[in-house]
């Protein structure tokens, strides 16, 4: 663990990768999150919630080029 925080280093790396896309104006952040980086098409999102583990799996895929752009696991409170 890093002395400066309570998270293990591997979780900090994942957190930095996720939060790294959230810079710039609100409009720029929304554009990057909702559009494919390769072709610019609108992404299709799907969410599957597991209430026993209190997590939601979010995946996004581009309908134009067929690439799975990202996959996140969100912890529910």
Image (cartoon, rainbow, N blue to C red):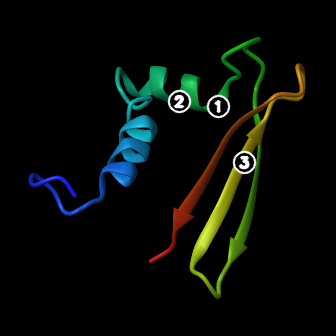
Residue 30: mark? 2
Residue at image point 44% right, 77% down = 77
Q: Is residue 51 left or right of residue 10?
A: right
Q: Residues within 10 Å of mark 2 (few under 14, many from 20)?
A: few
Q: Is residue 7 left or right of residue 28?
A: left
Residue at image point 36% right, 22% down = 25
Name the residue nearer the viewer: 9 or 49: 9
Which residue lies under the disc numbered 1? 34
Dot in front, 3 or 1: 3
Q: Residues within 10 Å of mark 3 (few under 14, many from 20)?
A: some
Which residue lies under the disc numbered 3? 59
Earlier sequence position, callout 3 versus callout 1: 1
Could you tell me how far apart the alpha carbons at marks 2 and 3 are, in whole angstroms? 16 Å
Q: Is residue 58 left or right of residue 18?
A: right
Are the two marked residues, 3 and 1, in contact with CB atoms closer than 8 angstroms? Answer: no
Q: Is residue 14 left or right of residue 41?
A: left
Depicted 15 relative to depicted 68: above or below: below
**Residue 26: horizontal and vertical position, in percent?**
41, 28
Could you tell me how far apart the alpha carbons at marks 2 and 1 are, in whole angstroms? 6 Å
Residue at image point 72% right, 48% down = 59
Considering the numbered disc 1 on the image, is that residue within a helix, a strand or a loop? helix
């Amino acid at each position: 663990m890093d002395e400066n925080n309570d998270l293990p280093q591997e979780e900090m790396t994942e957190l930095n990768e996720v939060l790294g896309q959230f810079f710039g104006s609100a409009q720029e952040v929304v554009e990057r999150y909702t559009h494919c980086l390769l072709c610019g098409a609108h992404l299709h999102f799907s969410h599957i919630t597991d209430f026993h583990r209190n997590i939601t799996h979010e995946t996004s895929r581009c309908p134009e080029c067929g690439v799975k752009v990202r996959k996140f696991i969100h912890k529910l409170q």
